[in-house]
Image (cartoon, rainbow, N blue to C red):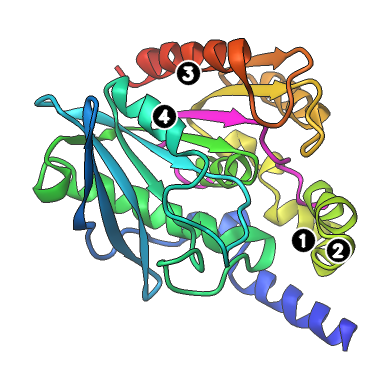
Amino acid sequence: MRWLALLLLLGAVQAQETIAELRARSYGKGELIIERALGQNRGFTRYLVRWPSEGLTQYGFMNVPSGRGPYPVVLVLHGYVNPYTYNTLAYTTRYADAIARMGYVVIHPNYRGHPPSQGSPEGVFRVNYAIDVLNLAAIVRKQSGKGPLAKADGSRMGLWGHSMGGGIALRVAVVDPQIRAVVLYGSMSGDERKNASQIYYVYSGRTRGLAELNAPDERIRAISPIYHLQNARATFSVHHGTADEQVPYAWSVELCQKLKALGESVECFSYAKAGHLFRGRNDQVFLQRVQAFFARMLP
């Protein structure tokens, strides 16, 4: 039964989930709709929003600055949270709020299977999460300046991703050449073999990730963003704590080396003795660097 599951998994990967196949697809059918206001905050209003992706209704929140705009758009992608206990205002809400106060329309998606978003969570190599973000990005570009996105300028779009969200952001960036700026914070690897090993041996106690870990090398290369970095047109800002016990610091070092070797535009920062989530002074410096980076790349 284990090998049957593996064969079914690999067949799904071969059908639709390589980087080349994702780049060949079209995205952005439907529109983003405001479900209701979630509250007025200092400098912005928060809304619950929804949009379609592959026949599923996806949800998230959107922070819209109080001024006239138009404002650049940043999609904030959270890391792993148990889908069955997920709350729309996840741990990354404080970062979404900080970026909104910097002068950006911020959309923080719930991935599929994270309530109230429809669908099943995870999937093969978390590609479905990236597909939902790709659809969101395309819808925002198409709809910007109108209706719920009247204050948004979708031509100036960046990504911010933490942990698993960083891995999703990296995949989106090598698929969507219109993404202009990407912040990676304690990001998972662009090499899906390394991610699968970490998920299987470290995160899940050998209960998740075995099929991905056993995928053939040629499929791993076809799926993994780190082998397709030349496709990205974004500038990257990479941030990682040297004492991160969840995601190895060495993964960001490797990514920075590969981006620089390709001549891609990247800045890289290490945070001595910092863990998977920054605290205190490290967090302040991180946000200052994020603000400066988006100001340069999304003027």
Percent coordinates x, y for residue 161 in the rendering? 54, 37
Observer-side mark, 3 or 4, equals 3
Q: CA distance from mark 3 to mark 2?
A: 37 Å
Along the horizontal axis of the image, is 215 left or right of 162?
Answer: right
Distance from label 4 to label 1 (Cα)?
28 Å
Please name the residue that numbered disc 2 is placed on: 216
Asked if residue 7 lies in the magenta stretch, the reply is no
The earlier-in-sequence mark between 4 and 2 is: 4
* Residue denoted by label 3: 290
Residue drawn 47% across the image and 18% down it: 290
Which of marks 3 and 1 precedes in the sequence? 1
Tag shown at residue 219: 1
Q: Position of residue 164 (x, y in %)?
A: 64, 46
Q: Amino acid at mark 4?
A: Arg
State how far apart marks 4 and 2 are (Cα): 32 Å
Query: In this figure, which residue is indicated by the disc labeled 4?
Result: 180
Mark 1 touching mark 3, by CB under 8 A? Answer: no
Q: Amino acid at mark 2?
A: Pro
Q: CA distance from mark 1 to mark 3?
A: 34 Å
Q: Please state the extent of the stretch shown in magenta in the rendering.
A: 175-193
